[in-house]
Image (spheres, rainbow, N blue to C red):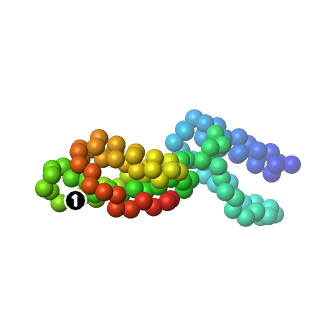
Amino acid sequence: MSDELSEFEQSVRREIDAFLKPGHEPSPRPDLPGEKSPGKKRTKPADGHESAKSYKTGHLVRLAVRTRKLETDTVFEHRSTSISKLEAQLEAEKAAKKAGYPIIGYVIDIQSL
């Protein structure tokens, strides 16, 4: 009975510490000798959504770009979340122009993520 009470107090204390210090992750709960430890479980963030980087959708577009007409080509890479190759290419061209490359030579490669 006292073990269950102390375990409950420790878990409540960890939750309070985690709430008061959002950047600090609580230390893992110590295993009790008579308790079976389950296998590792995949944890999800508290809000239920995974980060956008964890999903592998979209395209990686490589363009040959130049700042002047007679300059050698430079490779410009852009990651797009679009599932359409054409839309990903258009996004990459807009991003290249915004980055200061007014001349877009050709598409080197489009890879699916």
Position of 37 with respect to 83 (left or right) is right
User: Residue drawn 30% across and 57% down?
Assistant: 106
- Report whether 11 appears left or right of 97: right
The crowding category of the residue bearing disc 1, from other C-alpha atoms within 10 Å (few below 14, some 14 to 19, many at least 20), is some
Quadrant in the rendering for residue 108: bottom left
View extreme (right): residue: 1
Q: Nearer the viewer, residue 51 or 17?
A: 51
**Does residue 74 appear in this view?**
yes
Up-down: is 73 above or below 5?
A: below
In the rendering, at what x and y percent does residue 26 appear?
Answer: 60, 48
Judge whether 71 appears above or below 25 on screen: below
Residue at 54% in and 54% down: 57
| Image point (82%, 49%), residue name | 4
Which amino acid does the dot numbered 1 rest on?
Answer: Asp
> Is residue 54 visible to the viewer in this orientation of the structure?
no
Q: Position of residue 69 (x, y in %)?
A: 15, 52
Horizontal arrangement in the rendering, residue 103 relative to residue 23 (left or right): left
Residue in the foreground of this view, choosing between 85 and 11: 85
Left or right: 86 in relation to 27: left
Residue lying farthest left? 70
Name the quadrant containing residue 46: top right
**Residue at the spot of label 1:** 73
In front: 41, or 74? Answer: 74
Kindly identify the residue that appears in the image at 38 percent across and 62 percent down. Answer: 109
Q: Name the spot of residue 21 as percent of width and height, x first.
A: 54, 38
**Secondary structure under the numbered disc 1 in the rendered image:** loop
